[in-house]
Amino acid sequence: MDLTCTIDKVDGDLRIRLVGDIDIDSVDELRDLLQATIRRPGTDGLRVDLLAVTFLDSSAISVLVDASKVAEVEGCRFLITRPRGVVRKVLEVTGVLEALVPPD
């Protein structure tokens, strides 16, 4: 399955809704999208909605962590929202969940 996304605005933050798999084949595009969005003038916050993501690998985790670091430098709030199932478990096991996902 390919990765697709939509961007909208929620409570003053930009939200990127991702659908599909995030893996080595899609991470370059995702990295570019996240960094460009974070650096977009007027972006105070970015929420990456993972509800419809069915798989992510280590390259995807690296992209998400890198994006959070870029956001910190740019003064932009960066959150991962609604990870479910295997995606949530992978974020937990790698220690990324607490750093990037707000508590329920």
Image (cartoon, rainbow, N blue to C red):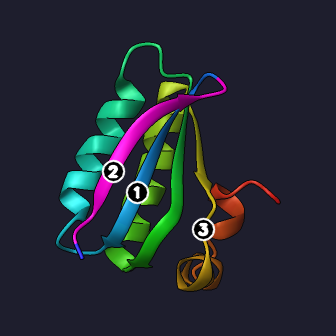
The kind of residue tagged 3 is: Pro
The Cα atoms of the two marked residues, 3 and 1, are separated by 11 Å
The kind of residue tagged 1 is: Leu
Q: Please identify the quadrant where the N terminus is shown.
A: bottom left
Q: Quadrant of residue 45?
A: top right
The residue to which callout 3 is attached is 83
The Cα atoms of the two marked residues, 2 and 1, are separated by 5 Å
Determine the residue positioned at 57% across, 80% down.
94
Determine the residue positioned at 43% across, 39% down.
70
Q: Position of residue 48 (x, y in %)?
A: 50, 49
Q: Is residue 10 magenta?
A: yes
Query: Compared with residue 58, is residue 10 higher up or lower down, i.e. above or below?
Result: above
Mark 3 neighbour class, 10 Å CA radius: few under 14, some 14 to 19, many 20 or more = many
The residue to which callout 1 is attached is 18
Q: Please identify the quadrant where the C terminus is shown.
A: bottom right
Mark 1 neighbour class, 10 Å CA radius: few under 14, some 14 to 19, many 20 or more = many
Are the two marked residues, 2 and 3, in contact with CB atoms closer than 8 angstroms? Answer: no
The label shown at residue 5 is 2
Are the two marked residues, 3 and 1, in contact with CB atoms closer than 8 angstroms? Answer: no
Are the two marked residues, 2 and 1, in contact with CB atoms closer than 8 angstroms? Answer: yes
* Sequence order check, earlier mark of 2 and 1: 2
Determine the residue positioned at 40% across, 57% down.
18
The label shown at residue 10 is none
- Secondary structure state at the residue bearing disc 1: strand
Q: Nearer the viewer, residue 56 or 74?
A: 56
Q: Is residue 104 magenta?
A: no
The kind of residue tagged 2 is: Cys
The Cα atoms of the two marked residues, 2 and 3, are separated by 15 Å
Return the residue found at the far right: 104
